[in-house]
Image: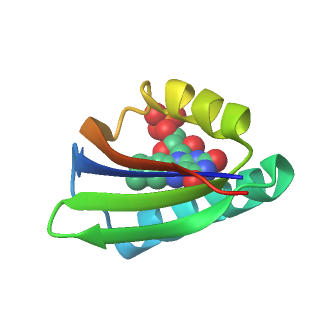
Amino acid sequence: MYTLTYESVAAKEFSNSEMDELLQKARSNNLKLEITGCLIYYMGGFIQVLEGEKEVIKNFIQKSRSISVIEKSICFQTTTLK
Ligand SMILES: Cc1cc2nc3c(=O)[nH]c(=O)nc-3n(C[C@H](O)[C@H](O)[C@H](O)COP(=O)(O)O)c2cc1C
């Protein structure tokens, strides 16, 4: 099991309905990928903790580089759990 924590700057302000849509997509996709975690939205930024199989998390992060609503992101922790 692997966890990755990153912080990112949102390229725009999210309305409640846009945030609901994002969460709906993320939750259903994460269920399929067997990823879990936590997403915090605060003052124009996100902190997200992801937990799952290492390769799955790494692939996800690679793909998320092209998410248009994220301006820049920085990974600040990875941990491999038993
Ligand atoms: C901060 C943030 C966190 C996200 N977390 C997840 C996630 O955990 N799982 C997932 O499948 N998609 C996640 N997404 C992706 C969204 O569900 C959605 O697919 C994406 O915002 C669409 O991007 P696009 O408009 O560039 O196509 C996340 C997006 C953002 C902005």
Q: Identify which residue, 53 or 13, lies in the foreground.
A: 53
Q: What is the count of numbered marks?
A: 0
Q: Is residue 40 above or below residue 14?
A: below
Residue 9: % across, % down: 21, 48
Residue 66: % across, % down: 44, 24
Specify how the rendered protein is coloured: rainbow
Q: Is residue 78 above or below residue 44?
A: above
Residue 24 as seen in the image, left or right of residue 76: right
Residue at horizontal 74 percent and vertical 50 percent from the top: 29
Residue 51: % across, % down: 63, 57
Residue 5 as seen in the image, left or right of residue 37: left
Residue 18: % across, % down: 44, 62
Residue 21 as seen in the image, left or right of residue 18: right
- The quadrant holding residue 5 is bottom left
Q: Is residue 56 above or below residue 66?
A: below
Residue at horizontal 63 percent and vertical 28 percent from the top: 59
- The quadrant holding residue 74 is top left
Quadrant for the C terminus in the image? bottom right
Residue 50 as seen in the image, left or right of residue 72: right
Q: Residue furthest right?
A: 32
- The quadrant holding residue 21 is bottom right
Q: Residue furthest front?
A: 82
Residue at horizontal 22 percent and vertical 43 percent from the top: 11
